[in-house]
Amino acid sequence: MFAITREPLDPRSLVEAVRCDECGAVVLFYGVVRNENLGRSVRYLEYDAYEAMALKKLRAVADEVRAKFPVTDIGVLHRIGRLEVGETSLLVAVSSGHRREAFEACHYAVDRIKETVPIWKKEVWEDGSEWIEGHVPEVPKVTGDG
Amino acid sequence: MPQVHVRLFAGLHDLVGKRDLVLDLPPGATIGLLRERLGEEYPVVQPFLSTLVCAVDEEYVPSGHLLGDGDDVALIPPISGG
């Protein structure tokens, strides 16, 4: 299960989508809107995305995770639009036979999402706002079809 | 003359005030040339160029990537999802 959505995220349906009878572990990561950043009080966040590409890149992260870790399944939901403090912006669920792989794969997946998926957040404070510049995505040196 | 469709997001969308642009480029134009042109036609974009990467048809591409008529180019400032 992969989605970029403006609707509140449902952790139960994501866990159910990745869980299976062979799985002894499901790790679920919540990314949550925090009320401060670098000492500034945050009123809310506004997320923008290149939705079609973001969905494609979420699936690419999942493919990387499956190639790297012996996991059973992975699902990712990312919310965009306006999110209030305490709301969930990201859910990543990973299932596997045993806990260690699920924890490691989930950690890796969250890192790769932040490095590769074209989504942006704007912090809105009492006295202004700013689009946060995080990672510059890695670009291939040459393109195949160029 | 290749005509390309350019998508803007986040801070670039706010600064330019548009979600989409159309640019006419000379034959043989690359992403590098498109970046130069953007800086000339939209000076507000200039400060972003050093950290901006581009995607064509939903894949990140290098500056040497050749552009064709009808290509769909997205301008990707540093990302901050999660």
Image: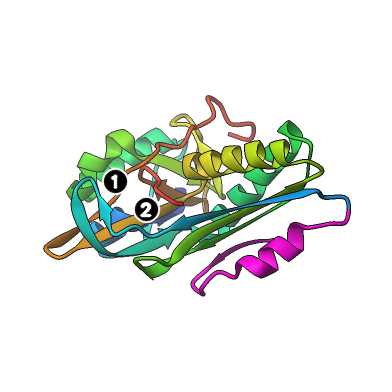
Looking at this view, name the residue that lies furthest to the top: A141
Q: Using the image as rendered, state which of residue A55 and residue B68 is in the foreground.
A: A55
Q: Residue at x 36, y 36 (%)?
A: B33
Q: Which of disc 1 and disc 2 is earlier in sequence?
A: 2
Marker count (numbered): 2
Question: Tag on residue A56?
Answer: none
Same subunit under labels 2 and 1?
yes
Q: Residue at x 40, y 46 (%)?
A: B79
Question: Magenta segment: does it hold A70?
Answer: no
Q: Position of residue A97 (x, y in %)?
A: 82, 43
The mark closer to the camera, 2 or 1, is 1
Which chain is mark 2 on?
Answer: B
Q: Position of residue A40 (x, y in %)?
A: 18, 53
Disc 2: which residue: B23
Left or right? Give the position of A47 relative to B14. right
Neighbor class of circle 2 (other Cα within 10 Å; few <14, some 14-19, many 20+) is few
Disc 2 vs disc 1: Cβ atoms closer than 8 Å? yes
Kindly indicate the quadrant of the structure image that contains residue B31.
Answer: top left
Q: Amino acid at mark 2?
A: Leu
Indicate the secondary structure of the residue bearing disc 1. helix
Q: Amino acid at mark 1?
A: Leu
Q: The N terminus of chain A lies in which quarter of the figure?
A: bottom right
Disc 1: which residue: B38
Left or right? Give the position of A109 relative to B13. right
Q: Position of residue A46 (x, y in %)?
A: 34, 64
Indicate the secondary structure of the residue bearing disc 2. strand
